[in-house]
Amino acid sequence: MALGRQLLLRENVLPGDADTVRSIVASTGFFYDHEIDVAVELVDERLQKGLQSGYLFLFAEQGGNPVGYCCYGEIACSEGSYDLYWIAVHSDCRGQGVGKTLLKKVEELIAARGGHAIWVETSGQKKYQPTRDFYAHNRYHLEAVLKDFYGPGDDKLIFVKRLDQNGRKD
């Protein structure tokens, strides 16, 4: 699934996207089955409730085939803080700029909605080092570490990127 064609982005969620998300997330090798199920549940909720679900999506497609996606939304009871719930790129397309393209577009979409901060959570396990490097490379800053959050020896790391009022990133 090498990228040779133009990458197209879409925000609308289609009925087949639950299977798409399952395939993309499973291909990464990072997540347990129950975590993959959660990613799919967010798609299902969006399909059932529409924008009322609070879940916003951005899909990256090449040649009509989805190769990556993001799920994000405004944090309840906040003013302009957004969670980036999921960002995943199919394993066949990793290292080709799909994740960076998705992330930059989501940042623009959040800024256009008046968002001022994007929060991301990930694991402190060694296998997630590429994930942490990805966020650091894209100017997300480690804000907090919650020791043993996911289990003994598995910390939750919280990264943030603050956006100024003109949509520029810190």
Image (cartoon, rainbow, N blue to C red):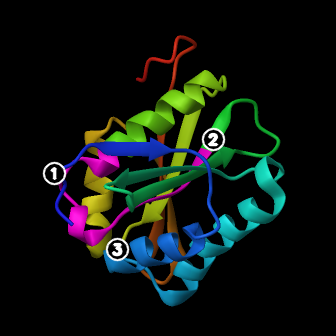
Of marks 2 and 1, the one in the foreground: 1
Of marks 2 and 3, the one in the foreground: 2
Q: Which picture quadrant has residue 137?
A: top left
The residue singled out by tag 2 in the image is 82
Can residue 158 be found in the magenta stretch?
A: no
On the picture, is 109 further left or further right than 134? right
Q: Earlier in the sequence, mark 2 or mark 3?
A: 2
On the picture, is 121 further left or further right than 8? right
Instruction: Give the Cα separation between the discs numbered 3 and 1.
Output: 33 Å
Amino acid beneath label 2 = Tyr
- Residue drawn at x 47%, y 86% as measured from the top left: 32
Q: Is there CB contact under 8 Å for labels 2 and 1?
A: no
- Residue drawn at x 19%, y 54% as measured from the top left: 3
| Up/down of 144 relative to 104, above or below | below
Where's residue 48, x and y in %?
A: 80, 65
The secondary element bearing badge 2 is classed as: strand
For residue 5, say whether it is visible.
yes
How many discs appear? 3
Instruction: Give the Cα separation between the discs numbered 2 and 1.
Output: 32 Å
Amino acid beneath label 3 = Gln
Amino acid beneath label 1 = Gly
Question: On the rendered image, what quadrant is the C terminus found in?
Answer: top left
Of marks 3 and 1, the one in the foreground: 1
Can you tell which mark lies on residue 52?
none
The secondary element bearing badge 3 is classed as: loop
Q: Earlier in the sequence, mark 2 or mark 1?
A: 1
Q: From this viewpoint, which residue is outermost toward the top?
A: 166
Q: Nearer the viewer, residue 46 or 71?
A: 46
Q: Nearer the viewer, residue 81 or 44?
A: 44
The residue singled out by tag 1 in the image is 4
Q: Where are the magenta residues, as a range?
A: 83-100
Can you tell which mark lies on residue 125?
3
